[in-house]
Amino acid sequence: MEPFYESCTQCPKKCGTARNAGIPGFCGEPAEIRLAWAGLHFGEEPPVTGSGGSGTLFVTGCNLGCSFCQNYQISHDGMGTAVSPEEFAEICLALASSGAENINIVTGSHAIPGIAAGLQEATLQGLSIPVLWNSSAYETPEALSLLDGLVQVWLPDLKTLNPLLARSVFRAEDYPAVAKKAVRWMANHSPLSIEQTGSTSYPNGKIVSGVIIRHLALPGKLADTELVLRWFAEHLQGKALLSLMTQYTPVSKSAHAAALDAFPDRVLDRTEYNTLVNLLDELGIDDGFYQELVQDTEWLPDFERIQPFTSVLAKPVWHWKQGFIR
């Protein structure tokens, strides 16, 4: 039994649910780890994807309630199946055997103790590639410390520094304060290190340690993105990389889609995109990445399918309905 889960205090929600007794917390999950999909993903930042792809595991459940979640099937709807720490380790090793550059754990903030146990088991069985923690940053340093020494690279999605937006869209008014503390913890525990594979610039290397801070720009909310970028420039420039994402897509099927009234029902437009690029220049942020503008709503993943993504973006290794893909 995990002490964190007895009356759950594992994440900042501290919902007090008896997850050890099988009762789902705010995150929608009991004590077990549940996964929806695992495979090689080729759509991450260049130092993450490398040539072999990122060995990505999508964890079921979430301790936020983002109204536009593109993975709503697993974060809100509970799609996935339970795996033991030993099975989790087996999936990690299968990804490594398939050529993965790293292990990339997506949205595991509510399941840290079980995931830590799975990573410990995988390490004992010979896992030697870097492990990436791909999360919302809605985490406490106490919980993150369970991953110290097991995770080498952190990919927090710094969603907003505006408490009002955090309350209405992400269902967590304390998100800005919590996330800033978590991101600083990550940066202090994992100095940036890029293993060069060709040219001397980091896009041609593989990240083996450090932090890549992601931020998704929202239509009609550029002032909120500016807050995030200015905070990054002041506190983390030179200590972490920035990844500015522009692929926001309205998701009407999200369980909390009513909150989308907070901003326009559309993708980012060209004027907004150009404003963001100019802001990066103004702030002198050049260590990182920004996405090209893609005004397309047809690419959302479907985790009912063994291949939730396009074949160009991903290669399945394990699926919640079928297990290992042979």
Image (spheres, rainbow, N blue to C red):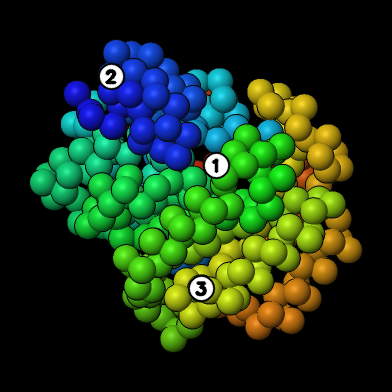
Say which residue appears at 25% left-offset and 47% top-offset: 146
**Could you tell me which secondary element the residue under label 3 belongs to?**
loop
Mark 3 = which residue?
236
Report if residue 88 is visible in the image. no
* Above or below 149: residue 296: above
Q: Residue furthest left?
A: 124
Q: Label 1 sits on what residue type?
A: Ser
Say which residue appears at 58% left-offset and 64% top-offset: 243
Q: Calculate the distance from the C-alpha at mark 2 to the C-alpha at mark 1.
A: 38 Å
Query: Which numbered dot is residue 67?
Result: none
> Could you classify mark 1 by the number of other residues whose Cα lies within 10 Å: few (under 14), some (14-19), or many (20 or more)?
few
Residue 73 in the image: state x and y as whole percent. 57, 25
Q: Quadrant of residue 297?
A: top right
Q: Residue furthest bottom?
A: 200
Q: Calculate the distance from the C-alpha at mark 3 to the C-alpha at mark 2.
A: 38 Å
**How many numbered callouts?**
3
Query: Which numbered dot is residue 20?
Result: 2
Quarter of the picture containing the N terminus is top left
Foreground pick, 190 / 322: 190
Say which residue appears at 75% left-offset and 74% top-offset: 279
Q: Calculate the distance from the C-alpha at mark 1 to the C-alpha at mark 3.
A: 35 Å
Mark 1 = which residue?
311
